[in-house]
Amino acid sequence: MKKLITDTFSRKISPERIYIEESEGIRFVATVLVIVGHILVYMGVKTETPYQASIPEKIFIALFTKAGLGLEIFFVLSGFLLMLPFISHYCINTKKPSLTEYYLRRIIRLELPYFLVLTVSSLP
């Protein structure tokens, strides 16, 4: 089980996995958009008086309150990266991706941390 978890979370590139380094930069930009957008929304909700921002601050706020843009970037990037093994299978006859392995990796990567956070946050 330990080997399965370490193999699933590793960034080791194997012949059957496609890794695009540039996707990490795009993912970083999307993450920053989402985090800063949430911070600005939180600050706007928590302030009792309206904040009078200068022109550069208004531009900054307008750019980073687009948290939805960061989510859209994540969705497009994820869809692109998830389809690559299937496209390479059908176009250049590589090994067919296993949906069982795919769903097992998704469960380990997404559901286990989700349930861990859910459990910890529900403790009194």
Image (cartoon, rainbow, N blue to C red):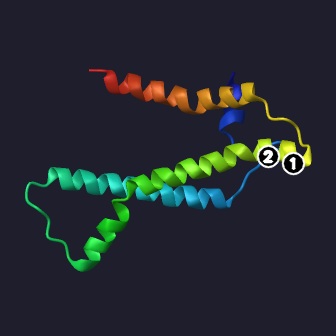
Which quadrant of the figure contains the C terminus? top left
x and y percent of residue 114 in the render? 47, 29
Which residue is the extreme one toward the left?
A: 49
x and y percent of residue 22 in the render? 66, 61
Residue that mark 1 sits on? 91
Residue that mark 2 sits on? 87
Contact between labelled residues 1 and 2, with CB atoms less than 8 Å apart: yes
> What is the C-alpha distance between the residues marked 2 and 1?
6 Å
Q: Left or right of 12: which side holds 62?
A: left
Count of all numbered marks drawn on residues in the image: 2
**Residue depicted at 66% across the width and 50% down the height:** 80
x and y percent of residue 40 in the render? 28, 57
What amino acid does circle 1 point to? Cys
- Secondary structure beneath dot 1 equals helix
The relative height of residue 1 versus residue 70 in the rendered view (above or below) is: above
Relative depth, front residue between 59 and 87: 87
**Residue depicted at 53% across the width and 27% down the height:** 111
The relative height of residue 6 versus residue 42 in the rendered view (above or below) is: above
Q: Residues within 10 Å of mark 2 (few under 14, many from 20)?
A: few
Q: Is residue 3 visible?
A: no
Which residue is the extreme one toward the right?
A: 93
Q: Residues within 10 Å of mark 1 (few under 14, many from 20)?
A: few
